Amino acid sequence: MGMIETRKFIRLAAVLLLSLFLLSCAKSGRINDVMVMDDTRDVLVYARLQSLLKEDTEKMIHAGVAVSCTFYVNFYQQRSSWFDHRLSSQVVRNTIKYDNIKKNIYVKMHLNGKVIDAAQFTDFDSAVSSLIDLNGISVAHVGKLRKTEKYYVEIKAKVGKAEHSGFVRYIMLFLPFMETETPWYRKEFVWKE
Amino acid sequence: MKEPVGQNQMDIREKRRRKRERILIIMTVIVIAFLTYAGNQFFQKQADWGAANNIFFVGLLNINIILILFLIFLIVRNVVKLVFERRRGILGSKLRTKLVTAFVSLSLIPTVILFFVSINFLSNSIENWFSVKIGDALNQTLDLAHIHYQQTEEQAKYYARQIASDITLNQLYDLERTDFLVNLAQLKQKNFKLGYLRITFDNRDKDVVFQDAAFPGVPADIFTAKVREDLYAGKDIAIVKPSNSGDLINVLVPIYSHVSPYEVIGYVFVGALIPKDIVDKMAVVSNTSEAYSQLRLFKTPIKLSYIITLSIVTLLIIFSATWFGLFLAKGITEPIQDLAEATHKIAEGNLDHQINIVAEDEIGVLVDSFNQMTRDLKKSDENLQLANADLVERRKYMEAVLLHVSAGILSLDKDGMVTTINRAAEVMLNIQAGNVLHRPCAELLAAENMSVINELLEDAQISGRGVVEKQVELLIPERPLTVLVTITVIHETTGENLGMVMVFEDLTQLQKAERAAAWREVARRMAHEIKNPLTPVQLSAQRLQKRYSDKLGDDSQVFRECTDTIINQVEVLKNLVNEFSRYARMPVTNPVMNDLNETVNDPVLLFQDAHKEITFTFNRGDGIPPLHLDAEQIRRVMVNLLDNAVAAMSKAEGQIEVTTAYDAASRKARVSVTDNGCGVPPSHTMKIFEPYYSTKKSGTGLGLAIVNSIIADHNGAVTVQANLPAGTVVTFELPVPEISAEQEYGKQIASV
């Protein structure tokens, strides 16, 4: 194999690899109803994830697969002459798990790795609604904000399976991941006292 | 013979490329195996890496696919190359193809069979996993567990409702009836065997609580806002919470006011415990059911993943076997190819060629033996070349000896074919080597000569010693030849007849010289012995005539005649003896540089004046260089030859032609005296140079003997030939010196 053929082959492989990589990074779903407001004490963020769950998600949840929906919420202070200043970064992770004995669906909410809320549902829709809702997460204390400054919230969501149960994990090779994520959404916020 | 530099460099480049390719293939296989293993491990561990997870896995998978494609490319390329090599008939390609085919077949057939059997087996197994019976059994078990939970919950709700109903009916929420409430609660807790019972009113600070000793306690996170909201909306609440002792079933039932039946004034909290051992058992069932459900959900992808895994492994085995076949075949055929090339090079004469293959197996032994053989061949070749060179030297030496030897040498093989003939033999026998070499001996000479030779050959064959030596006279055209023939039969050491060698020694000149010497001795003795008594005889006869011629009377005439005869004959005898005496006392030749034409011209003019009736012609040759000759003696030679020529004339219109010439090739000056006289018979040509042989009536027979003697003293030769149609040609040749005669002549002139 001559040098020219080798170079061509490497280029082709690189292009193929990059295409597959970009394909794998393809995003779907969106975040709706993003609201940023203050309750005189904290700046609260509300959001709802839409169209990110796949059709077979319900089947998977009922089969006992723990599915997670993670919201990444960053709060920035806008700066004109320099990079924007990130004031806070929150990771809210809701996990849903079906209990096939009790026929209940449990939804747990973690904030930065700690469980802050847990709910039990008997109907799937309510549980999923709880899973995809970001309900009033505090991103900053209003006392630290200035009226003259501009702020914004960046938010994105990612849905993926938490884990397979039992020995399934050992026999599942080359299965496609169900992890998908949304692009970043931006919502401006101006604090008015 | 050295190999071309370009060819060597190409070989090195090709070897390096092949080595690179081998390393590449091995590395690819290793990387594929590693990435497959890493992907598997990574997937199993389920690390929560978010998006990176996806990217890494897809990347891993793609790298694997690319590497497999690369491996396929390399293998296919090698196979295609092999096919082309086979088509072009490159040495070793057929064996390589056979080996690769064998390896691929050996690996392909079982691997493919195993692959399909495995796929079939796996599909059946996976199908069996999800059989309806197992699914039903698991569902039934789950239902049982669920019913157990439900029953426990319903029972707890029932007790709680009953207690709440009693409280409402008896209005035990009044503070005055607190004791009744406590007693009721205690009684119900005992009767219903409740693990935990709490009665809470909005208007009271203290709750009524009764708890079983084994009950672990109420979880704090039960009373969420939603629970409170539902409870005060009149709903019965049941919450299951896990604990260290088992699952707690917490039931909350609202308590209504008796006065206002829709007003919730408090609630009854009943806690029931499902023991841990039961919960654990149900958890096992639950997990198994979950795993089963997930497997059923991912049945097709799991099957696909196994097929992919098996396909990759199968492909790896096939490609590895193909590559191994190629590698092994190359390992076998390359040395064979090298051996063949080396054999070709050695056949071309390059004995320095060595095969550079290091191998421990039989190929290595073969290569070592081949190299050893080449070295031995080279050594033998060198020895052979030395021997050949020695033989060539010997042959050249022998040829030089044969060329320069005065004897004629001729060899015959066992079939009587002439194999060797030297220059002397060619000259002696007047034959050309090209005409007689590899021809039968019978064609060598004329028939009359061959009869003599054949007799000798027969004698040699029958002779016990194998050697015959005999002096014979051969009749070479226009020239008699006396030779001593020695024939030696050659035998191999094993006794095999290899032919014979014939040696001819020319005795003609020797014979001439011997005869001349003998005749000189005879002449000298005759001169000495006869001359001495002649004078007294003559004097005595004269004295007798003087004294008695007048006294005898009538007889005096007779007496005078007789004594005159004696005196005259003695005079004749004296003349004869004087001639012999002169022949015996031939003066020593004193050669100096002389012009041959001038030397010859004087006697011709003398004879022309003396014999007007004969036409003398002198053909003066051009370009004859000055010669070393004794002019006086050469003139005597010419006088004798012209005298003989004149004597041979029997008719009036005689012609004598004298011709001089120079043969530059043989560096000889030639003088011919041609007459149209009576000539000399061929049989007498040998004897005319002998003394006392003459065809003339008054000749002494010493003329040509003297001519022969003088010319021999000048290192020349005299020949006699017939002048057709009549007459004789007597020719003598004189050698021209090697050094530049003109220069020497110039020197002599200068010295004079």
Image: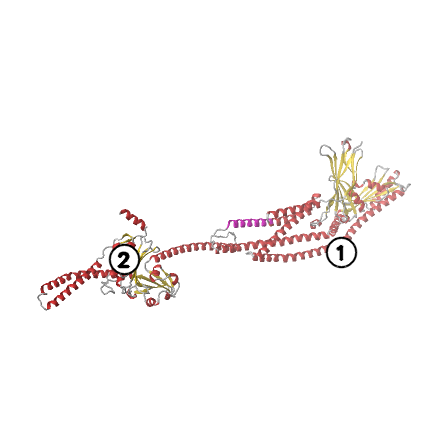
10 Å neighbourhood of mark 2: few (<14), some, or many (≥20)?
many
Residue B133's label in the rendered image is: 1
Using the image, name the chain to which the residue with label 2 belongs: B
| Label 1–label 2 contact, CB within 8 A | no
The residue drawn where x is 71% and y is 34% is A83
Q: Residue furthest bottom?
A: B554
Q: Is residue B61 left or right of residue B511?
A: right
**Residue B41 appears in the rendering:** no
Snapshot quadrant of residue B254: top right
Snapshot quadrant of residue B588: bottom left
SS assignment at label 1? helix
Q: x, y percentage for residue B545?
A: 11, 64
Q: x, y percentage for residue B80?
A: 61, 54
The magenta region covers B4-24
Q: Is residue B526 left or right of residue B63?
A: left
Please name the amino acid that badge 2 sits on: Val
Residue B604's label in the rendered image is: 2
Q: Is residue B303 left or right of residue B327?
A: right
Nearest to the observer: residue B717 or residue B407: B717
Q: Is residue A77 left or right of residue B601?
A: right
